[in-house]
Amino acid sequence: MQALTGITLIDGIHNSPIQDAVIIIEDDTIHSCGSKNEINLTQDMKIIDYQGKTVLPGLIDAHTHICFEPAADPLNILTEETDAETAIKAARYSHQTLKAGFTTIRDVGGKNYIDFAVRDAIKADVIPGPRILASGKNITMTGGHGWPIAEEVDGTAEVRWGTRKQLKKGADLIKIMATGGVLTEGVEPGAPQLTLAEIKAAVEEANKAGCKTASHAQGTTGIKNAIRAGIDSIEHGVFLDEEAIEMMLENDVYLVPTLIAVKMIAEEGTESGIPEFAVRKGRAIISDHLRSFQAALDAGVKIAMGTDAGSPFNNHGQNGLELTLMVKHGMSEMEAIKSATSISAELLGLSAEIGSIQPGKKADLVILEENPLDNIENISAVSQVLQNGNPVF
Ligand SMILES: [Zn+2]
């Protein structure tokens, strides 16, 4: 057993941290934790003193693209490079993500099932990386958002086929495209895409297999179609009106805002090489996106932390920037931390294993140099990451 001592403990569930706390780890599991007075240290324990440091549950990013090179035009790179090249890069991005304290990611859109190969290689200890839940190819309509790397399907029968195919190949969840988006040429973020009946077919097939669903959804009609179809999470949620927020609350639908993705596109501009159509759309939606985020937050919609890492200049391993933005736009530091731990774990259906520091949970931990409650930017000053109780290098 190992004992981490001298720490400030933020457990991902409770609102106040425990000062001078101790965490006891047995193999890959948290055995016990609490203030120093409550926890007995015994002779056989390996004591690691982290005096002055803050410990959080391993962070969770609920929206990544581990196959994407976060350059000016990721989709163009993906269509030009070979699968082997994509896979080698994805392995490197996985390591970067893990070292930043993100011990779990939900990857929502890969290429040619490379996301599954990376997930399985990490699981088998072939390469270092976070635990990955992967969706395989996105389900989109012909010419719909993300089509160059997605499964293009039309009509409910084809949607069922496309969804079943992802499940057969090993999808942990299904991601569908309910609206247009920023990074695909010729589609508009506000425009609905897959129909209500088509989304329902995808959700039904996924749920039959015990899998959850996520929808890329930016425009209001598409967002509502996805919620009516029974989706588990709305990704981006750019144009949320009051009714959409009400529907999310009623149906227990999570929002995954990905504020950093739009910010990077709008800020970097065409000078950086981002295609003109993407910059135009990014800049057009940014204020509505922030307004929707704040309205959802005020209404009490569950918000899971997701970055869209892999989108332009949205680097794998800088996932913590999203928490900084969420705080800048109205969340408390503790809310942002919960969003990236216990709330994301709930969305992923993994609350029994991860997302909090409690006895019986996996010993996935982030040790930070400074307390992120004092300044959320401290989330990126990682001293050490433990994965299944083992230090990550
Ligand atoms: Zn995305």
Image: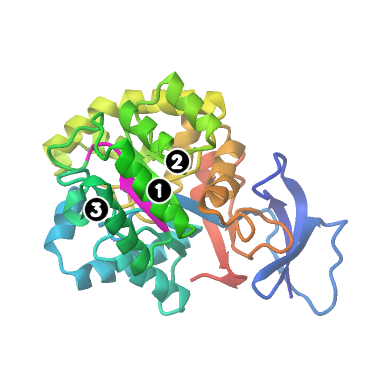
| 47 lies above or below 286 | below
Between disc 1 and disc 2, whose residue precedes? 1
Taking the spot 20% from the left edge, 32% from the top edge, the residue there is: 188
Residue that extends furthest to the front in the rendered view of this protein: 157
Structural distance between the alpha carbons of marks 1 and 2: 7 Å
Magenta residue span: 173-182
Q: Which residue, given by chain and number where applicable, does mark 1 sit on?
A: 203
* Residue nearest the viewer, comparing 339 with 372: 339
Mark-to-mark CA distance, 1 and 3: 13 Å
Residue named by callout 2:
230
Can residue 179 be found in the magenta stretch?
yes
- Residue 211 seen in this snapshot: no
| Residue ranking furthest to the top | 242
Going from N to C along the chain, the mark reached first, 1 or 3, is 3
Q: Residues within 10 Å of mark 1 (few under 14, many from 20)?
A: many
Of the residues shown, which amino acid type is indicated by label 1?
Val
Q: Earlier in the sequence, mark 3 or mark 2?
A: 3
Cα separation, mark 3 vs mark 2, equals: 19 Å
Query: Which amino acid lies under the numbered mark 2 shown in the image of this protein?
Result: Gly
Residue at 37% x, 43% y is 200
Looking at the rendering, which quadrant does residue 90 occupy? bottom left
Is disc 3 placed on a helix, strand or loop?
helix
Question: Residue at point 52% right, 70% down?
Answer: 392
